[in-house]
Image: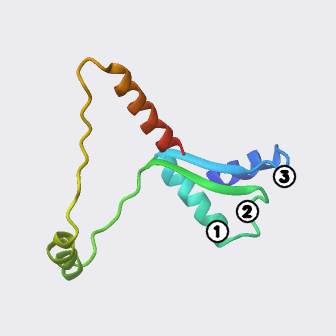
Amino acid sequence: MDVINFVKLVAGKHPANIPLFVSGESFGGCLALLASKHFQDHPDEAPSNFDSTLLICPAIDGDLPPLPVYLLLRYVLAPMFPTKTVSVVFPACCSFCFQMYHSLIILVVIL
């Protein structure tokens, strides 16, 4: 497979002490997942510095569970755990507060 050979090629061009992350967006995420699964199933073929996989909106398709399980989850368990919403209100004249709040959200997402 091309993506597995490419990962091995890239890993071979860098020192073994530098961790290798396989990343992909959309269909590339699907390919990154395929390569990572291959390395998990065949650890002898994986590069020694292979560390993790980063998926960004991967194009994967999942099936719904069987109908009885779906009905149990939707109509029995879901009502037992209602969603909670949190609203944040800033004064109209205080754009600094909004900028600080936005920066905090970005920081939390990054961490």
Q: Horizontally, is 42 left or right of 78 in the view?
A: right
Rendered residue at 69%/48% (across/down): 6
The residues bearing labels 3 and 1 have C-alpha atoms spaced at a distance of 18 Å
**Marks 2/3: CA distance?**
12 Å
Q: Which mark is residue 1?
A: none
Residue lying at 74% horizontally and 51% vertically, measured from the top left: 19
Mark 1 lies on residue? 40
* Residue that carries the numbered disc 2 in the rendered image: 46
Q: Which residue sits at x=79%, y=60%?
A: 48
CB-based contact (under 8 Å), mark 1 and mark 2 = yes
How many numbered badges does the structure rendering display? 3
Give the image quarter of residue 81.
bottom left
- Name the residue tied to disc 3: 16
Depth order, front residue of 17/45:
17
Residue positioned most to the top? 93
Q: Is residue 8 left or right of residue 71?
A: right
Outermost residue toward the bottom in this view: 68
Secondary structure at numbered mark 2 = loop
